[in-house]
Amino acid sequence: MKRKFIMLALLCISLAGVAQQDSTANYNDGTDSARNQERSGKAHHWHHWHEWHPYPKHITPSNLSTNWLVVDLGFANFNDKTNYTDAGAQAFAPGSADNWFHLKANKSVNVNILIFMQRLNMIKHVVNLKYGFGIELNNYRYRDNIKYLTDPTKVVMDNISYSKNKLAADYITVPLMLNFNFTPNLRDGFGFSVGASAGYLYSARQKLISDEFGKQKTHDDLDLRPWKISWIAELQLGPVKLYGSYATQSMFKKGLNQVPYTAGIRLSNW
């Protein structure tokens, strides 16, 4: 509709110019040349506007399509449900309270790299099955100077001031979702997906930076669960794609009841 309106407006301008030229056919003081240049400039402007404001691209969907290298950029956090008066919590983190594990939210990040994501048509390309394979990287930046000890795993409040204190938990992940695509014939359409992902912990570590000891890294599972099952969802609003996840249980085997979640922007072709 907007395109038709602009075309109609340009047509009216052209017709008005022709009519004015006819009415002054016997009188030419050089304004006709200026008027022609003006019309040429407007047409040139329309050409560039169309290049920079393309209309939605129509596609013919296939029954099985593959999207290579999907990247998620977002924030990582957790819902802390720990009862710090419980004996298990105090055994894992002696003297701990609910303020020990507060995060720097703007520096706690989640990055997902899916090597591939496939979409399988189930019902008229509107209902699809989506699945993939990749890695999930989570960095939790602590505000306070907590430190993880190993053999056995314990968390203590250190008397050293750390300029950087993060827990990293990395997983191999396999997402599986039911996708609802309301505009299957548009490349950048509208829809959403819901499902679950299974993740296996392949790397965990705490990284500390202080003036006293410089950079320190502790590579250990830190009593994190080896498997992580999460509810996941994504939302597509034209070219903008959002994602989110919420785990089904605490990321720790014992002591702490901290349920991780993520949210951010998804970079993908569909």
Image: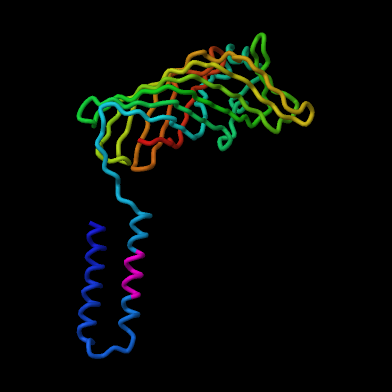
Q: Is residue 48 left or right of residue 214?
A: left
- Residue found at x 33% / y 80%: 33
Q: Is residue 211 above or below residue 1?
A: above
Q: Quadrant of the C terminus?
A: top left
Q: Picture quarter containing residue 233?
A: top left
Which residue occupies the foreground of this view, 56 or 265? Answer: 56
Residue sitting at the far top: 151
Residue 211 falls in image quadrant: top right
- 206 to the left or right of 250: right
Between 137 and 84, the residue placed more toward the observer is: 137
Indicate whether residue 47 is drawn in magenta: no
Spot occupied by residue 13 in the image (x, y as percentages of width and height):
25, 72
Region of the chain picked out in magenta, as a range:
37-45
Q: Residue 108 at x, y = what percent?
A: 56, 32
Q: Is residue 98 above or below residue 53?
A: above
Residue 16 left/right relative to 188: left
Colouring style: rainbow
Between 112 and 163, the one nearer to me in the picture: 112
Residue 7 is situated, as x and y percent measured from the top left of the image, at 24, 63
- Quadrant placement of the N terminus: bottom left
Q: Horizontal placement of 10 versus 151: left or right?
A: left
Residue at x 32%, y 66% (from the top left corner): 43
Task: Tell me where residue 217 appears, x and y as whole percent.
Answer: 68, 22
